[in-house]
Amino acid sequence: MPNPMNIDMSRRNKSPRALTDNERARLEEYIDSIHYSARYSDSEYEYRHVQLPKAMLKAIPKDYHDAAHGTLKLLWEDEWRGIGITQSLGWEHYEVHEPEPHILLFK
């Protein structure tokens, strides 16, 4: 699969892992508290960051977490949409802000 955005594929699950109904239900209470930044850009990409409620991290399944970095893994689109992030098509989760692991960076 082409990787035009240079996403570190080793920091993702090998393939998207859908949430179970019980997992999705545990995340439901947090969805209205997700914060979306304004878009910003450089000469190559448009960016935004998404701030999850800190308590939400504990409700996200363990196999979405990257123990080596102390953050979430880089999530596939099906995964980030599954946990309740909603944004237009074309966004890629490319990084997690390690000092603040509840902040996901998209381009």
Image (cartoon, rainbow, N blue to C red):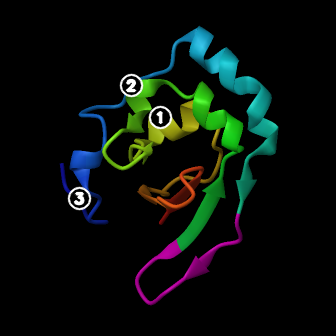
Q: Which residue is mark 3?
A: 3
Q: Residue at x 49, y 57 (%)?
A: 91
Q: How packed is label 2: few (under 14 Cα within 10 Å), some, or many (20 or more)?
A: some
User: Looking at numbered disc 1 in the image, what kind of residue is underneath it?
Assistant: Glu
Q: Nearer the viewer, residue 90 or 12?
A: 12
| Position above or below: 39 against 62 | below
Q: Residue at x 23, y 59 (%)?
A: 3
Picture coordinates of residue 24, whole percent (x, y): 62, 19
Per the image, label 1 sits on a secondary structure element best described as helix
Per the image, label 3 sits on a secondary structure element best described as loop
Mark sitting earlier along the chain (1/3): 3
Label 1 with label 2: CB-CB less than 8 Å: yes
Q: How packed is label 3: few (under 14 Cα within 10 Å), some, or many (20 or more)?
A: few
Q: Which residue is mark 2?
A: 17
In this rendering, would 16 be left or right of 45? left
Eye-nearest disc, 2 or 3: 2
User: Label 1 to label 2, Cα distance in Å?
Assistant: 7 Å
Residue at the extreme top of the image, as rendered: 22
The span shown in magenta is 37-46
Q: Residue at x 54, y 71 (%)?
A: 47
User: Looking at numbered disc 3 in the image, what kind of residue is underneath it?
Assistant: Asn
| Position above or below: 98 against 30 | below
User: Label 1 to label 3, Cα distance in Å?
Assistant: 18 Å
In this rendering, would 98 be left or right of 66? right
Q: Which residue is mark 1?
A: 79
Picture coordinates of residue 96, whole percent (x, y): 46, 57
